[in-house]
Structures are given as structure tokens and as C-alpha cells.
Amino acid sequence: MAFSFTLNGRTVTPSGYAAHTTLLDWLRSGGLTGSKEGCAEGECGACAVLLARPTDDGLGTRWDAVNGCLLPLAALDGQEVRTVEGLGQPGALHPVQQAMSVGGGSQCGYCTPGFVVSMAAEYYREGRDDFDIHALSGNLCRCTGYRPIRDAAMTLGQPDPQDPLARQRLQPAALPAETHLQTAQGEFHRPATLEDALALVQQHPDAQVLAGGTDWGVDLNLRHRRAAVTIAIDHLPELRVLQEDAHTLELGAALPLSELERRLAGRVPLLAELFPQFASPLIRNRATLGGNLGTASPIGDSLSALLALDARVVLVGPQGEREVPLERYFTGYRQTERAVGELIRAVRLPLPLAPITRFYKVAKRRYDDISGVSAAFALTLDGERVQQIRIGLGGVAATPLRAYRTEDALVGQPWTPDTARQAARLMGREGTPMSDMRASAEYRKAMLEQLLLKFHFETSGQEVPA
């Protein structure tokens, strides 16, 4: 019933936990209070910790910053974590802590440990030349002390070759262990194989299936939801594929978005536009395409992009695999074609890709925010005419949807300002937008029109009159 993991360089065996206990809660209950709870939904980054993960070739270790408030404690069985206390100590500060201290990069101090951890992840990033300030886009400072924090980050050089965490990058990372835990408040399972996972899903049809946990963690923390059984599938090789043939590009449902971004390296330009706008690096280090498809939220940012890419969902169950076109996958608000006992294994994109694509996200903040509206476009021109166009929309209906009427109106037409203006009026009537805290229905309709006009302007170089 026990499990263990490595915390700040030593093996620990937790006790007194529940299946839903988060790493953050367990750390703080044990006196490691450097990690803070600011929002409990992965938005502020005050809870950031370093998670050791395999490099893309499997030969070394990456130090990824993730949200401790969204990470189930039981999911760490066999793995390694560093908190801010594991970076340096008084009198022997870590280079990141030293830079923050010298530069005055802390005001009230509440957010500082999270910033330090995210900066450390970037500090140890393999191949880093300069510091990518967007590595901190998942950390918020309530005192608006960003300038000294940024200045401290920009002073960081390369790690000393004898730095223990730098040297550890050369060794394979500890891998998740098969886990079967039963606590007074629920069970947690990490099956060893896909066959075992399917058997567990059959046995527990109401189980919470967990990949990155960035959505489920919010339900745990803010809505106090509990699952009798949780099944982790993030480690299964069949769900972590990334392969391509002449006709198809297959993306594993359990690959973290940050890993997809690195490994695709711009191969799918539409996704390359999406990734930096999807939440924050802390979230992308855990979030998956399968998670967006599983929760089926109409504002899941990846879904409008996948619709524009004409994606197909690969489902696997006791009877084998089947493919479902993404446009038919959604059947209602947070309802899908996935049957009881099935798992989302992968997403398949048909090749060749459309040559002209864009992804747009309308939100109150540019980064680390939820969409009011999202729109993705994939366009193929034949000379000056529209040969084919696919438009995926999010945030304007109970499900993500294709803008079929707008697509039909554009096909065969010249790609001119007049065509775009007429189609934009039609696109403003796609879906059934509603008013909520993020945007009014009228605003969403207006944004649909403007996004099509913007897409035309950016891809034709011609200004479109309002």
C-alpha cells in the first residue's frame, strides 16, 4: 500500500494521505512551506515545484516546473521532485536565489518561491543561450514587482558543471512506477500496461482517468470533487506516440503540450501558434491533447485548432481501436462519442497540411487566461480563389464546432476584401454564443466577424473595410 519518491535528494514514503491529496497540501503539512497556495487552480505559480522527467530521447533528465497544487501526491510514485527548499539554503544560496536577492526581486515574498522554481527550470534548460522570459509567464506577482525579477533572470549565466542538478541532466530520469493504492478516501492506480488500464476502466466505469490533471486538479481544489477511483495513464507508451507517414501525423493523447511543441518543432504551424497561448509553461508541462478531448470543454483551446486541422480521434477499448472525426466526436456540452470502457489513445492529422493557417484567441489577458472566443483557420488557395477552408471555433456554443456555413460560402470565391466582408457577417451568426463573466454574446459575435477579417488581412495583405 505504501509508495515512495525522491524529494530534495532523499527518498520519502508518505503516510496519512488520501487518493486525492495534492503534492502541495502534503508538502505544507510536512513543514515545507516555501511552496504557497495562491489560487489553487494553476494560475499564479506560487506552488511551483521541479519535476524530473526524461529528455525527449530518454537518455537524460529535464527539470520541468509544474504546479504542485494540481499534482496528485500518489502520481509521484517512483519519481523525483525538488521544491524551493531543495535548491539552496541560507548561506549557500542557489544561483537563482542569489540573483533574486541581489536584484531585489522580491517584495511581499509570497510569490517569490514560485518564481525561483520557474527560473531554475529555465536555468537548467538544455541548450539555453539567453533566458526566455516567457518561462515566467505562469507566475504572478501581486505587488507588480516584475522589473527586478526580470532583471535578476537576465543576469543568469550557465550552470556550473559541478552543479548537482546540472550533472543530473546527464543521467536518465526516474520513471513513474506501477502504483495501486487504496486509502480511506479513494483508490489511485497507475497500471503497468494499456491492457491493464483498459481492464481497470472496465472494472471502474466511473473512475477519473488522469493524464496531466490540470483540469481535474481544479475540480479537486475549488469544487471539492472526489473520485472513488483515479486511474493514471500519462506514462503508457501507446498514448505517448509521435509518428508520421505519408498520409498521417499521429500525436499521442498523453504527451504533455510542452513536449509536443519541442518535438514538432514547428512542423504543424497552426499548433505552433496555439502552444504559446495555451495557459502557461507550468500548465503545458502537464496538460495534454487527450485531456482537452476528455473534458470536452467548449473553451478548450486546442479543440478549435484540431477542428481546423480536420483531426480524427483514436479511441481504444476492449474490442480494439476506432477512429472518430473530431467534428462528430462532440455530442453535447462536455459529452462525447467516447464509450464506457474506452480511452483516448491519439489524435491523427491528415497530410498534407493546409498551407495557410492561423490561430486566434480572444481573452482578457494575452497569456495564462481562458478564452472568451477562439478561432482557427486552415486555408488552401487555387490562385486567387478559395479551394478549401476549414474553420474551428471555441467559446460560441455548447461544443467546439466547425463554421460550416462560412466555409461553404467561401469555397470557390475569390479571396478578396469583399468576399471576406460578406463571409464575416455570416460567421458572426455561427454557433449560439451566450453571455457570461468572460464576454457577452454580442461581443462574441462581433469577435467572430473581426477574426475572419483579421485572417484575411494577414493572409492577403489587403485591408478589409469594416
Image (cartoon, grey):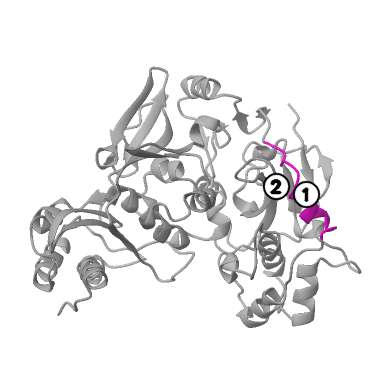
Near mark 2 (Cα within 10 A), the count class, few <14, some 14-19 or many ≥20, is many
On the rendered structure, is 341 left or right of 154?
left
Q: Quadrant of residue 275?
A: bottom left
On the rendered structure, is 461 left or right of 82?
left
Which one is nearer the viewer's eye here, 210 or 379?
Answer: 379
Q: Which residues are magenta?
A: 161-175
Looking at the rendered structure, which numbered label has been put on residue 249? none
Residue 206, percent from left and from top = 46, 29
Q: CA distance from mark 2 to mark 1?
A: 7 Å
On the rendered structure, is 103 left or right of 388?
right
Q: Could you tell me which quadrant the C terminus lies in?
A: bottom left
Looking at the rendered structure, which numbered label has been put on residue 61? 2
Residue bearing mark 1: 168
On the rendered structure, is 7 left or right of 309?
right
Residue 341 located within the stretch drawn in magenta: no
Near mark 1 (Cα within 10 A), the count class, few <14, some 14-19 or many ≥20, is some
Of mark 2 and mark 1, the one earlier in the sequence is 2
Residue 163 located within the stretch drawn in magenta: yes
Amino acid type, residue under disc 1 in the picture: Gln
Is residue 176 at all visible to an observer of this figure? Answer: yes
Up-down: is 41 above or below 202?
A: below
Q: Residue at x 75, y 47 (%)?
A: 170
Provide the secondary structure element on which disc 1 rests. Answer: helix
